[in-house]
Amino acid sequence: MKELNNMGFGHYGGSLSIVETLAVLYGNEMNIDVDNPQKEDRDYFVLSKGHAGPGLYASLFLKGYISEETLMSLNNNGTTLPSHPDKNLTNGVDMTTGSLAQGLSAATGIAYGNKLKGLENYTYCIVGDGELNEGQCWEAIQFANHRKLSNLIIFVDDNKKQLDGFTEDINKSMDFVKKMQAFGLESFRVNGHDVYEIESAIKKAKLNNESATVIVLDTVKGYGIDAVANAASNHHLRPSAEMMTQLEEAVASLEVKLKG
């Protein structure tokens, strides 16, 4: 969020709704090595909803993959941090994403390739609820079922909003858990803003050796910052002076907690 404030605009809403999931993955769950980011047996992460790149970049900064100076260069000319992740530019990014639905397909391919190599690692993928309007996602999910990709863990960021409004008003989602189960994958819903529930869900997913697992995250777009969460359209924001003050105060408060 600090890098977005520095720029003065960007994808606040969808980045804030996955903060806790990123914190659990990068803070505790993923087998990764900052000193050897390309090690073969690492866990892979694919941010299929690539517009939430600022959230991923913040995680990479906290983990040590990128510097604060790099973080603050988000979306500037010549930056290595474009608004959507690019594996050819950013240290620690496993897959270039941004064209919605393609990231989930890539994640299934990565998981399948690693399975063929006999690697005992995991591929994690976050896909948006609005993104699941796209048919390509369901082709990937069907493939994951057919290949029994138990090394693939998919998170659905069910924040109820997408670019043009509420997801239910644009294309009714129905029950994601039941839909995923109908496609043959293990699936369940958790509070997407509770790190303990998310961590417990991942551990449960790792006990499943028969199929990929889908963890549906019940989230709020813009969670944690009332001015963002309550904004009618919060996919991409150019904050007002009042909202910017709230955002800067929130960042300052979090920095105090992190340093404490």
Image: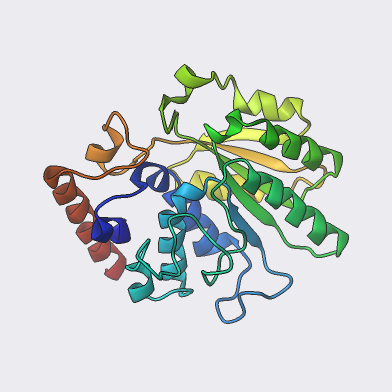
Question: What is the x, y in percent for residue 96?
Answer: 59, 58
In the rendered view, tell whether residue 216 sits above or below residue 257. Answer: above
Looking at this view, name the residue that lies furthest to the front.
77
Identify which residue, 13 or 223, lies in the foreground.
13
Question: What is the x, y in percent for residue 251?
Answer: 24, 57
What residue is shown at x 29% (from left), y 28% (from top)?
232
Looking at this view, name the residue that lies furthest to the bottom.
35
Identify which residue, 14 or 192, lies in the foreground.
14
Quadrant location of the N terminus in the rendered image: bottom left
Relative placement, left or right, of 207 versus 219 is right
What residue is shown at x 71% (from left), y 33% (from top)?
138
In the rendered view, tell whether residue 106 sits above or below residue 213. Answer: below
In the rendered view, tell whether residue 260 sits above or below residue 214. Answer: below
Q: How many marks?
A: 0
Identify which residue, 68 or 122, lies in the foreground.
68
Question: What is the x, y in percent for residue 172?
Answer: 54, 18
What residue is shown at x 44% (from left), y 74% (from top)?
66
Q: Quadrant of residue 17?
A: top left
Question: What is the x, y in percent for residue 228?
Answer: 27, 39
> How is colour applied across the structure in the image?
rainbow
- The answer to whether residue 250 is visible is yes
Quadrant location of the C terminus in the rendered image: bottom left
Relative placement, left or right, of 237 versus 220 is left
Relative placement, left or right, of 7 versus 202 is left
- The answer to whether residue 206 is visible is no
What residue is shown at x 60% (from left), y 22% (from top)?
175
